[in-house]
Image (cartoon, rainbow, N blue to C red):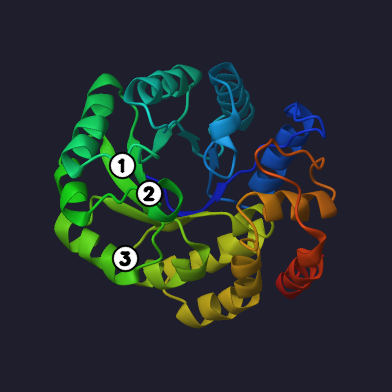
Amino acid sequence: MFKGSIVALVTPMQPNGNIDPQSLHDLIEWHISSKTDAISIVGTTGEASTLKPDEQFDIVSRVVKQVEKRVPVIAGTGTNSTQHTLELTLNAEKAGADAALIITPYCNKPSQKGLYQHYKLIAEKTALPIILYNVPTRTGCDLLPETIEQLSKIPNIIGIKEATGNVDRAIEILKRCGKKFEIYSGDDLTAMDLMLNGAVGVISVTANIAPRKMHDMCEAVLSGNKALAEKLNDELIPLHKNLFLESNPVPAKWALHQMGKIPPGIRLPLFPFDPKYHTELKNAMHAAGVV
């Protein structure tokens, strides 16, 4: 249902932590004009864990209304509580999102049976297409290929954002689930390789900073132009790496502020980007041609 460069959008905030609606509006228009293929909002990069439910609903509603179907809008709705996740998913459905991106429950460390029942319950309560989201380094919870295979049989669970960076694992998931189940990379550094092996896109942090180049790289892969994809990806590799010098989205929000796109705000417990890393990230931005 979705393909190409899907930006995992930051949530612009003022220095006091208040959401900045005008900057959010401007970011959306910039991404659409830069040919970003879909927009994923209020996810990990969007600081979802620090947003209140009414803030999430407001952001999703604003973005859906603004976008007017020009590109798909995917709402992050996952938490470590099944009931809270269901509440946020139904809110996203009410707001008009095109799909829900649901991270594995963090901190709880559920069993594979618990994970299956978690996603199954939510899928049965919503008509939204659901994209699973597996990122064990952040959650302490790993959704295994055999569980993903079981979940892929539920009609409105359409794919997974696989953020382990393990290409062989993603290939195994594809073999288990078939081509109708879509895989999206959640790791910019290995995204091109994953797409060359059957993934249909990337839900990208780098796309926040270099949206057009990420779109062009993904388009090159999907159209079979491997040489162009490799050339563009080589220019993006410094960004892929240096946007994780500190916890995401700290570096990405700093870079966007340097580009004049957003105010410098970020919510505790995240803290502004350490000056000792500024030069490294600036150099990466230069390498990608965004400054």
Q: CA distance from mark 2 to mark 3?
A: 27 Å
In the image, what residue type sits under mark 2? Gly
What crowding class fits label 1: few (fewer than 14 Cα within 10 Å), some (14-19), or many (20 or more)?
Answer: some
What crowding class fits label 2: few (fewer than 14 Cα within 10 Å), some (14-19), or many (20 or more)?
Answer: some
In the visual, does 282 lie left or right of 138? right
Q: Quadrant of the N terminus?
A: top left
Q: Nearer the viewer, residue 266 or 67?
A: 266
In the visual, does 223 lie left or right of 19? left
Q: Which residue is mark 2?
A: 140
- Report x, y in % for residue 254: 76, 52
Q: CA distance from mark 1 to mark 2?
A: 6 Å
Check residue 198 in the rendering and tell me which mark sits there, or answer none.
Answer: 3
Residue at 82% of width from left, 35% of height from top?
A: 15
Q: Which residue is mark 1?
A: 109
Q: Are marks 2 and 3 in contact (CB under 8 Å)?
A: no
Which residue in the rendered view is the most extreme toward the bottom? 227
